[in-house]
C-alpha cells in the first residue's frame, strides 16, 4: 500500500512530541513493505528552532537512529496532485497550514482515489475550538484522534463513526531496556515548560517532591524562560537543555525513575490521554510515578505498571520507596514493559491504522451510512 503523510516535521522533535510516534509508525509501515512518503513544510517552526539552538548537528541523532527515514521538505510551489499521485492513503497532521488542509480536501472531493485522514494529536479542539472548526475538513474520509475524549469532540461536530481513536505509542525499535545492567542514580524528567499551563503542578509534583525525597533531579526540555530556570535552581534541579528524542533511552538507562506530570488540558478536559513519555519510559523499563490523571480508557494498570500520586507528599513517598526498594523498581519495570509490548507499540498502531483504512475501503454508500 502507498502512504503519503503530511507532517509538521519528522526530522525535528524540538517541542514536537508527535514526531517520536510518527517515526516509529513510518518505520513499521516500511518494515511491512508498504511505500511511505513523508512531506514536511520547508521552514517548519520546530526545524527552525532546532537549527537556531543547535545548528545542523541537532539532526544527527535522528539521522543515526533512523537512517531508513527520508522526509522531504516542500515549498509553496508544491504540486499536490503530483505529490499524492498513486497514493492509496494520505494522512494530514493538524499542525499543517490550513490552506494545505483545505487543498487536500478539495483534491479528494474532486475524486482523487486515495483515502484522506486528518490526524489530531493536540488539545486545541477544547482549548481553541474555533481555530479547529475553521479548518475545512469537508473532503476528508475520517479523523484520527489520539484519545477517546478527543474523538468525542469530533463526534459532537458531526463526524459520527468516521472518527477513530488512534493513541500514540512507543517505538520499541528504539525504546527498550538496556541490553546490560547500568549504573542508575536519581530521577529524570524529559518535558517542555510550555506556556505556564502547569507551572504549579511541576513545582509540586516534580521539583518539590524530588527535593523532599532527597533525590537528584535532571531535567531536559525546551521553552524554559528565565523564571522557570530560576525555579529549577531554587529546588536544586539540574537543567540539561534540549535532548534529541533518539537519545532518550540512554538517558533513561542512567536513572532510577521518572515522573509524569500531565498538562492541565489532558488532566481535566481530555482525560485518558497520557504524554508519549509514559509509553517511552515504560518501554525502556524505567519505573514511573504519575501525578493525577484519569486513565479513562484503561490503557495501563495503575499501581502495577506505574504508581499514582494524589499529591506532592505522596509523590515524595513513592520516590523514596523506589530509591530504597530494588524489588519494587524491578516489579514496576517488568509490568510496565509487558503492557507496552502487549498493547502499545507503534506496530500495534499500524495494525489499527490498516484496519481503519480497510474499513474506509467500503462503498461510498456504506461510508455515508457509517457517518450518520
Image: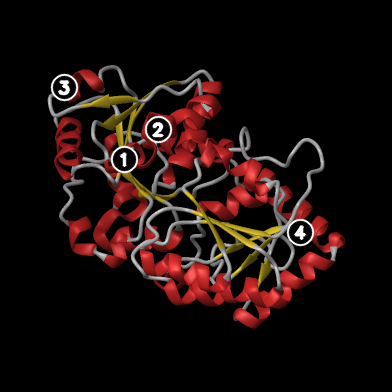
Can I make out residue 292 in this image? no
Q: Which residue is mark 4?
A: 332
Q: Dot 1 lies on which element? A: helix
Q: Which residue is mark 1?
A: 52
Dot placed on the residue nearer the N-terminal end, 3 or 1? 1
> How far is disc 1 from disc 4 in space, using C-alphas?
39 Å
Please rate how many residues cluster around mark 4, counting C-alpha atoms within 10 Å: few if below 14, some from 14 to 19, many from 20. many
> How far is disc 2 from disc 1 in space, using C-alphas?
15 Å
> How far is disc 4 from disc 2 in space, using C-alphas?
32 Å
Q: Residue at x 38, y 29 (%)?
A: 56
Dot placed on the residue nearer the N-terminal end, 1 or 4? 1
Residue 278 position within the rendered picture, expressed as x and y whole percent measured from the top left: 58, 55
Q: Which residue is mark 2?
A: 11
Residue 259 position within the rendered picture, expressed as x and y whole percent measured from the top left: 61, 63
Q: Which residue is mark 3?
A: 79
Vertical order, 70 against 241 (above or below): above
Dot placed on the residue nearer the N-terminal end, 2 or 1? 2
Dot placed on the residue nearer the N-terminal end, 4 or 2? 2
Dot placed on the residue nearer the N-terminal end, 4 or 3? 3
In this view, the residue in front, 191 or 126, is 191
In this view, the residue in front, 146 or 56, is 56
Please rate how many residues cluster around mark 1, counting C-alpha atoms within 10 Å: few if below 14, some from 14 to 19, many from 20. few
Amino acid at each position: 500500500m502507498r502512504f503519503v503523510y503530511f507532517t509538521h516535521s519528522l526530522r525535528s522533535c524540538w517541542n514536537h512530541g508527535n514526531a517520536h510516534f510518527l517515526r516509529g509508525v513510518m518505520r513499521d509501515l516500511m518494515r511491512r513493505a508498504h511505500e511511505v512518503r513523508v512531506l514536511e513544510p520547508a521552514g517548519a517552526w520546530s526545524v527552525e528552532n532546532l537549527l537556531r539552538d543547535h545548528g545542523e548537528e541537532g539532526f544527527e541523532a535522528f539521522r543515526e537512529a533512523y537512517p531508513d527515514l527520508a522526509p522531504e521538505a516542500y515549498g509553496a510551489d508544491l504540486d499536490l496532485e503530483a505529490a499524492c499521485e498513486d497514493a492509496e492513503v494520505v494522512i494530514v497532521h493538524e499542525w499543517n497550514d490550513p490552506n494545505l488542509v483545505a487543498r487536500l480536501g478539495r483534491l479528494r472531493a474532486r475524486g482523487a482515489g486515495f483515502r484522506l485522514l486528518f490526524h489530531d494529536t493536540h488539545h486545541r479542539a477544547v482549548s481553541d475550538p474555533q481555530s479547529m472548526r475553521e479548518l475545512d475538513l469537508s473532503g476528508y474520509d475520517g479523523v484520527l484522534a489520539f484519545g477517546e475524549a478527543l474523538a468525542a469532540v469530533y463526534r459532537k461536530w458531526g463526524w459520527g463513526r468516521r472518527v477513530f481513536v488512534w493513541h500514540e505509542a512507543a517505538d520499541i525499535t528504539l525504546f527498550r531496556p538496556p541490553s546490560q545492567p547500568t549504573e542508575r542514580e536519581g530521577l529524570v524528567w524529559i518535558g517542555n515548560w510550555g506556556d505556564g499551563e502547569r507551572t504549579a503542578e511541576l513545582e509540586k509534583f516534580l521539583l518539590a517532591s524530588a527535593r523532599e525525597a532527597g533525590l537528584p533531579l535532571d531535567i531536559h526540555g525546551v521553552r524554559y524562560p528565565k523564571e522557570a530556570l530560576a525555579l529549577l535552581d531554587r529546588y536544586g534541579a539540574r537543567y540539561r537543555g534540549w535532548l534529541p528524542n533518539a537519545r532518550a533511552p540512554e538517558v533513561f538507562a542512567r536513572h532510577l525513575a521518572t515522573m509524569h506530570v500531565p498538562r492541565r488540558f489532558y488532566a481535566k478536559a481530555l482525560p485518558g490521554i497520557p504524554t508519549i513519555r509514559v509509553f517511552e519510559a515504560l518501554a525502556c523499563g524505567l519505573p514511573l510515578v504519575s501525578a493525577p490523571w484519569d486513565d479513562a480508557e484503561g490503557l495501563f494498570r495503575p499501581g502495577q505498571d506505574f504508581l499514582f500520586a494524589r499529591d506532592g507528599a505522596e509523590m515524595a513517598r513513592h520516590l523514596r520507596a523506589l530509591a530504597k526498594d530494588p524489588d519494587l523498581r524491578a516489579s514496576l519495570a517488568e509490568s510496565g514493559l509487558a503492557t507496552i509490548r502487549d498493547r502499545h507499540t507503534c506496530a500495534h498502531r499500524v495494525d489499527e491504522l490498516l484496519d481503519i483504512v480497510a474499513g474506509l475501503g467500503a462503498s461510498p454508500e456504506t461510508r455515508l451510512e457509517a457517518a450518520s
